[in-house]
Amino acid sequence: MRRGLRARGRGWARLWVIGVGLGLASPGVLRAAAPGGDWLEQQEAKLDEAEEALKHAAEAAKRAVGVSEEELAKRLVQGQLQLAEGDYEGAAITFLDLLENHPKSQAAPQAVFFLGEALVPLQMERWAFELFTQNLGDGRPEAKRFHQRSVARLLDLSIPRREAGFARRPGLSATPEVRARLRAVGVSTTLEPPKGKMRDEDVERLVRWAQSYPAKDRQPELSYAFGRHLYLSGRHDDAIAVLDAMSPVDIPITRGGEGAQWRVRAAYVAASATLAKGAVDEALERFGRIVKANPSAARDRQIVQLSWLAMARIHHDDGNVEDAVINYRRIGRDSPYFAEAMYETAWTLMAAKRYDRAVQALDLLLVYDPDSPIAAEIKHLRGKIRIQQRDYEGAEEQFLALRREFDRLGKRLGSKLQSSGDATAYFAAVVGEDMEHFSLGSLLPQGAVTVARALPRAVHAEKLSGEVGALNRELDELRAMLAQMEEAVAVPHKAKLFTDLAGHVAALDQGALDVVEVQEQLVARLSVKAKGSGLEQLEGQRRRLREQLDAPRGGANPRLEGAARGVERLEQQAHKLELTVDELRAQLVATERYYEETRAEQKIDHQAFLTQAAEMRDEIASLEDESAALRRRVGRARAALRFANPEDDTWRQALSAYQQHLGQMYAALAKAVPDADADRLWKRAARWHAASTAVRSGLDDAAEGRLKKALVILAEERVNLDRYRVELDAVQGRTKDLVSQVMSATYRDVVGELHNQVMRSEVGLLDVAWAMKEAETDEVHRLELERDRTLGELDAAVQMGLEELGR
């Protein structure tokens, strides 16, 4: 405090000396242009520009921030594009923002429907149901446009669609052989449509609502959803009537126009309803019209391929082998249904005893998808076909190869884990190491993975682990992003966080330089007329202050440089941890491989090995978590360095010091050399500086106002994310234990299934031996019959000869 007062006292003392001892100007002082009208106009023009920038900045500081209906309409379109591209989460966020922050806008009623559409693929059916119902209760014109589509979506929710890829699952073939095999083991061959979560009375209300629209006024989307609902509800005649109205027989299915995208689908469901009624010939005719279509959309092309499959299956059931095979082969290799079509083709050819062609179909299927879940079934089937072909040697080789393959895998897996306790602990370590990228291949060799993927609970556990791991990563990313946002809003000058306000701040900075330049010219103008030895001292001080002002931003800053070095040290620590993790993982892989290859030759303590491997995996997971935490600290520190921006404060301090020094020089010079024009301009410049300080503060206040709601949201989200972190940690632990238990059971199931495949191979060998025995028995029987026939013929010939001799 005292030092500051002394400094100020020395400054005023120097000004007094200058005021009483003015003399000739020393070399190096500011030089001004010769006084004149042009010079004054130039300085006034600079001040005019600076004042104009100040005026716009002041208006921006007072302007209330709002979003126009045009901007909201653009956001609505952006959400629709996200929805069309499959970015359901992004679309849901866009529509939810419109609903929560702009509920009275024209875009809000439309956002209600589109938010429901985005939520259905995210498996938030209950919320989607509420939104579609909300749309139906909204009588505004913007909402009425979507009433029919809301009814269609609710009808779909009443009988949900199957998950993607359901029709391509192996084993869903509709051939009689497969149906007979399923019935033989007590499995139902009838697949009922999935049941929705809506009440029956709500479904009936929807049906009446759909019926309330005349057929000519019903939108194609609603007509298709209504017809589909009627078909899946067993009302086949009503479904056909509704769907045929969409795609009349005399109009090509792929013809353009309104509702063209729904015609192929409507025609397929109508054909299926006709087949369900038992009208086989009419159904064939309907499917035949569909396959003549050539739609451009990929989903519509798949419906055409499903129609080929339907026709092939109908011909198969009728015993029309040639037509069935022809229709099956219309499905190309680029189709997702190719594998199913080839599998059914093989069964169809087997039923017709065309074994060579059946083997060709199976061989092609193995080449097309060697890792298919039914690859083992296909190989067994090839052996059985060879038995039918009486190629006993080839059949025996086929079953022997299968037995060796599965026996090797079974022994390899069976001896690896000696007890369920060892397995569970080891699997828990494997799962916990990287839950997001955990896969069955992390535990099983490639040949056994195919078997494991046929077990629904194993696939579900793998998916569950991946979802929890992805959720954990996303939560960490959200927390890191929130930390960066907290650093951003904590800066003292918040105006630079917004593009428009930052532009005004930059204009004020440039205006300040222009005004200071005018002040320099005014000081130089008066200095020409002044004389005194003390002026050189002030001029030297001015030059030093000017050099500080002109120093590039981002120059030497010990505090900033120290913080940057601290961030670099954190990055180095994280990098060292990552290298350690890589080294430990390499050691783990080498240890496990050595165990796999040498356990048959050495007496290895299995429990000790698995315990050691589990501990190493836990250590790797712990180090990875520590490295990730360091990376998050680095990200937050870098955000703090980025948004703190101390260079601006340093520059403004230099500007203020320089402007004050110029003011002191001008005050001293003006006493000795009065100049009315210069005084008028100086007062304008001084007013500009005073006003700019207030405007800068106003811009920061405006930014604070904009951030007010954001700050509340950030505080709420910090609490929410911290709570989610605690909940997810608990869920993650339970998931790890659950998945490890499921994997332990899956491991045993896979070993059991491999033993079952070995047994089936041995049964196949018995079938070969039995077939050979039957063939030998048949041959002996044939030879006996031939012998008896020959002996009978000889007896008859001898008898005839004796009779002739007796005559």
Image: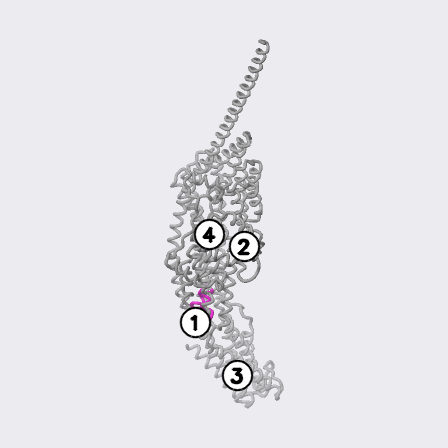
User: Circle 4: is it few (<14), some (14-19), or many (20+) Cα within 10 Å?
Assistant: few
Circles 4, 2 touching at the beta carbon (< 8 Å): no
Mark 2 residue type: Asp
- Residue reaching furthest to the top: 806
Considering the numbered disc 4 on the image, is that residue within a helix, a strand or a loop? loop
Considering the numbered disc 1 on the image, is that residue within a helix, a strand or a loop? loop
User: Circle 3: is it few (<14), some (14-19), or many (20+) Cα within 10 Å?
Assistant: many
Q: Which of marks 2 and 1 is in front?
A: 2
Instruction: Give the number of the disc on residue 546.
Output: none
User: Residue 492's spot in the image, x, y percent?
Assistant: 45, 71
- Disc 3: which residue: 685
- Disc 4: which residue: 163
Considering the numbered disc 2 on the image, is that residue within a helix, a strand or a loop? helix
CA gap between label 4 and label 1 equals: 36 Å
Q: Nearer the viewer, mark 3 or mark 1?
A: 1
Q: Is residue 424 visible?
A: yes
**Is residue 668 depicted above or below 423 in this figure?**
below
- Disc 1: which residue: 104
Circles 3, 1 touching at the beta carbon (< 8 Å): no
Mark 3 residue type: Ala
Image color mode: one colour
Q: Can residue 611 be seen in this view?
A: no
Circles 2, 1 touching at the beta carbon (< 8 Å): no
Instruction: Give the number of the disc on residue 300.
Output: 2
105 or 554: nearer the viewer: 105
491 or 479: nearer the viewer: 479
User: Residue 97's spot in the image, x, y percent?
Assistant: 45, 66
User: Residue 188's spot in the image, x, y percent?
Assistant: 42, 43
The residue shown at (55%, 19%) is: 787
Q: Which of marks 4 and 2 is in front?
A: 2
Is 389 part of what is drawn in magenta?
no
